[in-house]
Amino acid sequence: MLLTLLLAAACAPEPVAPHVPPPVLAHAARASDTGATAGELEARLNALLAAAARGGPVAEVPAGLQELAAAARALGGPHVEALGALARTAGTAARLEIAGAAELRRQALQDLLEQARDDARLAAFLERFGRDNTLAIGLAESERFLGELAARSSSAELQAAARAAHALALFEAADALAPERVPELRRRLELAARERAGTRQGRRATAALFHWDHLRVMKVVPAFRGRTAAGGELDLAELRGRVVLLDFWGETTPTPAELELRRAWRKQHAAAPFTLVVVAGRRAAAPSAQEEAWLARLGDGDEAALDAAEPAAAAFVRARRAEEARRLAAQLAELELDTPAIVDGLDARWSDAFHVPNAPTTVLIDAQGRVRYRGLARDELALALRALLAEAPTPR
């Protein structure tokens, strides 16, 4: 399991999941000796770390970490994005027991506390807890950093954001959380939902609470709707009586072998009560600062909120929503995968509700509507699918 988590954190390019806001690291000043940006250095390190996690060489990783650390210093203080990138990559390297990585992670987080605890730019780093920061940095270090930030920042906004990030960090690590900490997790999520209402963090905390109440393994999935790439809506409750495989995609598409497997399952089980549902977001162009503020406040298209919003904001969100659906539909057509697809927009409500901090992964729901399996390996998934179809009632 640890290796799976390390690979998920290490293999992913700048955002790990489709819902992470467009990276700002790509726009960082060129500061390293090689002229690379902090974002380019992080991507290069992620590739090295992915290879190391698979048993490959680690010799180049320490030098890469030092180059990123040097870039963070050269960019001037505080450079929040570069320090955040260093904390993530050094954290992943520390899990691989690469010499010096743990100290670089500690120093990067300490520099953020000392230099940026009142810097509004820190908000983007905080939003990534519960998505990819926690798994990369490690839960213990994440909790220490977020607790100190909430206590030491003089910004009420950042204090609340740090508390919400702490709640979402615990939720990201919920599968490995000690049972005695579960009540604390719920209290923190409830506080985050209240304190951060009307923000991306608040919506994610609400989705996490929904998961806890309704979408854990052996829970019966209630009515849960999403927009499809074809322009309609899909409600999981209406698929009761069918075995449903939710296929969560990341920024990259599944491998050709994985796609062929999905096509084969659809063909093999064409007469069975089986539905494959892709859940993915296809990011449109990076928004401007004003557009990003609208998206953070309004999410990816709640109609009641849009009706009450200023016309320019509502028009932008609706246009972006339509563009994301178009992109996902085009991708499915290119991949020749004819199956329902949910557009998991900027808020990634489905990924949050089903507790998918990192994609790709799968969630398997039985014909009684119960969540049965999460994140199975390919062979296990095929066996589980056949077993659940054998349990399902015969279609009339």
Image (cartoon, rainbow, N blue to C red):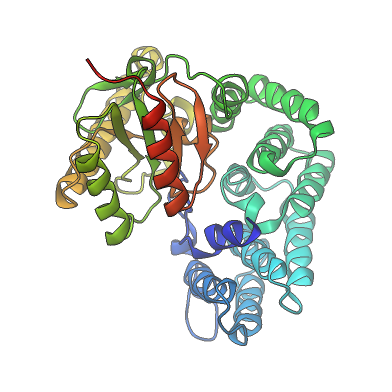
Residue 357 sits above or below residue 192 on the image = below
Locate residue 95, reporting x and y percent. 70, 66
Can residue 11 be seen at all in this image of the molecule?
A: yes
Locate residue 197, reporting x and y percent. 59, 21
- Image-quadrant location for residue 155: top right
Judged left or right of residue 354, residue 301 is: left
- Image-quadrant location for residue 180: top right
> Along the line of sight, which residue is nearer the eye, 198 or 327?
327
Q: In percent of the image, x 49 and y 66: which residue is there?
A: 39
Can residue 346 be seen at all in this image of the molecule?
A: no
Q: Quadrant of the C terminus?
A: top left
Locate residue 382, reporting x and y percent. 39, 46
Residue 61 sits above or below residue 319 on the image = below
> Along the line of sight, which residue is nearer the eye, 148 or 329?
329
Q: In percent of the image, x 44 and y 63: which residue is there?
A: 26
Judged left or right of residue 78, residue 358 is: left
Locate residue 346, reporting x and y percent. 41, 37
> Along the line of sight, which residue is nearer the eye, 329 or 263?
263
Q: In percent of the image, x 66 and y 70: which residue is there?
A: 93
Count of numbered badges drawn on the protein:
0
Q: Quadrant of the N terminus?
A: bottom right
